[in-house]
Image (spheres, rainbow, N blue to C red):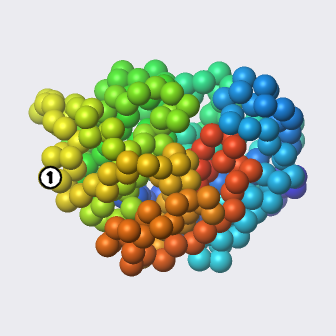
Amino acid sequence: MVTLTENDKQKRRTKMDSFQVNCWSEHEELKVVMLCAPSIVDVTDSKIAEQVGWSEPVNHHKAMENFLALKTTLENAGVRVIDYAKELTKEQQLLSEQLINRYFVRDLACVVGQQLLPGNAGSSLRRPEYPYAHAILAKWFPEPFISNAQPSQSLECGDVMLLNKDAILMNLGMRTSLEAVESLKERFFQQGFSEIAVIDLPKGNDTLHLDMNCNVVNHNLMIAKSFVRYFPVQVFTAQGSYFDMPAPFLQRHGFDVYWLETYKTIPDINLINLDPETLVISKQASKQQLLKHPILSKKKLLEVDITELEKGGGGIRCMTLPLVRK
């Protein structure tokens, strides 16, 4: 891996001054995104994969090929891609390049409006990644980065979904706590969001974060596993809270739901919007199922082969941290 000199890093910091973080939804045009190259470690057999929470062994050379394919797809579409691993010091690199989950950058932080909120690891396996990434983000974006907003309890940002400028959906997953949500809700209200819906979905490897259960695929459409409709949401407002069910809550905020009865969790749900007309999806995704929906049938689908990376238990959304959408 290439390590940048201090002069190179200073140039990079200067370039970061050319934009400020800005995200109000999941569906507007993606302009800038942060990624991280996979580690240099092979997960060599099925038993080890199971013990570290992965589905299959992974070859790091194939994983890097997948990463470069994703990076190139985004760049060719006009997205500015930043690999934060290149910003680490030589000493940090020695540890970071051995952290097998480091390419799942979505969990590290989230841009909410014009603020950059740090997450807090809910897994000891991932804990070293967070201070490294947060230090870099704070250096790049000192004003938007809310250093004193890091929740005291675990909150991984794969459990945070921006529906629109009015509403946020969050999940109390295996790695996100209600205490963390409550500690951050005022930050969301300050940005102008009026409602934060919190759902508590089953806790397992195939339901690990919110974006493994549902996702925004258009300004007025979500896809979701069919069981999600049975779990109530607690909706927080600046005045208090109330309970509702997912479908009516989403409908009030302009969303219909495409309920999926059959699905492959990671490729079928864990995708991203490149812009209002385009989705970036896994080569393993069930394209025909997506195209059955009248709204999705009109979408352009950019397919990327990330099969090796998906064995780590996450998909395209997990691997991307949007910094600017417009």
Q: Amino acid at mark 1?
A: Arg
- The image shows residue 247, relative to residue 220, as above or below, that is above
Q: How many marks?
A: 1
State the residue at coordinates (33%, 72%).
295
Indicate left or right for 18 with 93 as reference: left
Q: Is residue 45 left or right of residue 28?
A: right
Residue placed most toward the observer, 19 or 245: 245
Residue position for label 1:
252
| Residue 283 coordinates in the image, percent (x, y) | 63, 63
Element class at badge 1: helix
Q: Observer-nearest residue: 104 or 55?
A: 55
Q: Looking at the figure, which quarter contains the C terminus?
A: bottom left
Looking at the image, residue 256 lies above or below residue 231? below
- Along the line of sight, which residue is nearer the eye, 157 or 213? 213
- Return the x and y of residue 50 as percentages of the image width and height: 71, 27
Q: Quadrant of residue 24?
A: bottom left
Q: Residues within 10 Å of mark 1 (few under 14, many from 20)?
A: few
Residue name at image x 66 percent, y 48 percent: 310
Residue 12 drawn at (x, y percent): 70, 61
| Residue 46 image-quadrant placement | top right
Question: Which residue is found at the position 39% from the left and 78% from the top?
Answer: 298
Residue 170 seen: yes
Compared across the picture, whether 155 is left or right of 52 comes to left
Q: Residue at x 59, y 50 (%)?
A: 315
Position of 97 relative to 279 (above/below): above
Whether residue 270 appears in this view of the structure is no
Q: Is residue 256 left or right of residue 113?
A: left
- The x and y percentages for residue 285 are 56, 59
